[in-house]
Amino acid sequence: MSRRIKEFIEIRDHSSLDDLIAKLVEVRDSLPEQAEAELRLRGDDVFGRQLCVSYFRDQTEEEAEFEARYADAHREAKERELSRLQEELGVVCYAAGGKRNKLRIVA
């Protein structure tokens, strides 16, 4: 199971158009295939503006290991918190039958 991760590159210091074009060409050449890159202008007049390039890359094996390691613990913590809140409020949540399978809350 390979996931794609969204990465960001911020380009802040560009004094001339030639420098900016050179930096953008360098970034484009370093992107992986199927990156689906986007270029946006971010910031405001107070803190300044910068160009931001976002793109997708494949998840590394190390990142997949971390995610697998902590996904179960995170899910269990959420379930414990939901159970605690349900006991505190006297509310039970369950998936309703039917095509949409919406969550129903019964008090």
Image: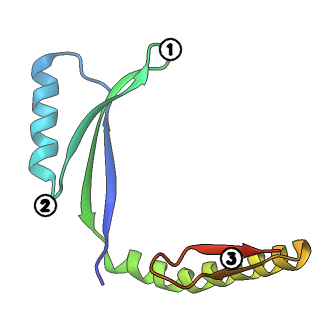
The number of discs equals: 3
In the displayed structure, does residue 45 sit left or right of residue 82? left
What residue would you read off at disc 3? 78
Q: Nearer the viewer, residue 42 or 30?
A: 42
**Where residue 76 sits in the image (x, y, percent)?**
67, 84
**Where residue 11 sits in the image (x, y, percent)?**
29, 33
What residue would you read off at disc 1? 46
**Is residue 29 depicted above or below 1 in this figure?**
above
Q: Residue furthest front?
A: 98
Image quadrant where one finds the N terminus: bottom left
Q: Which amino acid is tagged 3?
A: Lys
> What residue is rendered at 54% in x and 81% in y?
71
**Where residue 93 sits in the image (x, y, percent)?**
71, 78
**Is residue 48 depicted above or below 25 in this figure?**
above
> What residue is rendered at 55% in x and 73% in y?
102
How many other residues sit within 10 Å of disc 1, few (<14), some (14-19) or many (≥20)?
A: few
Distance between mark 2 and mark 3 Cα atoms: 34 Å
Task: Give the label, 2 or 3, closer to the camera.
Answer: 3
Badge 2 vs badge 1, beta-carbon distance below 8 Å:
no
Dot 3 falls on a residue whose secondary structure is: helix
**Is residue 15 depicted above or below 66 in this figure?**
above
Q: Which amino acid is tagged 2?
A: Gln
> What residue is rendered at 16% in x and 26% in y?
20
Badge 3 vs badge 1, beta-carbon distance below 8 Å:
no
What residue would you read off at disc 2? 34
Q: Mark 2 or mark 3: name the one nearer the start of the chain.
A: 2
Q: Mark 2 or mark 1: name the one nearer the start of the chain.
A: 2
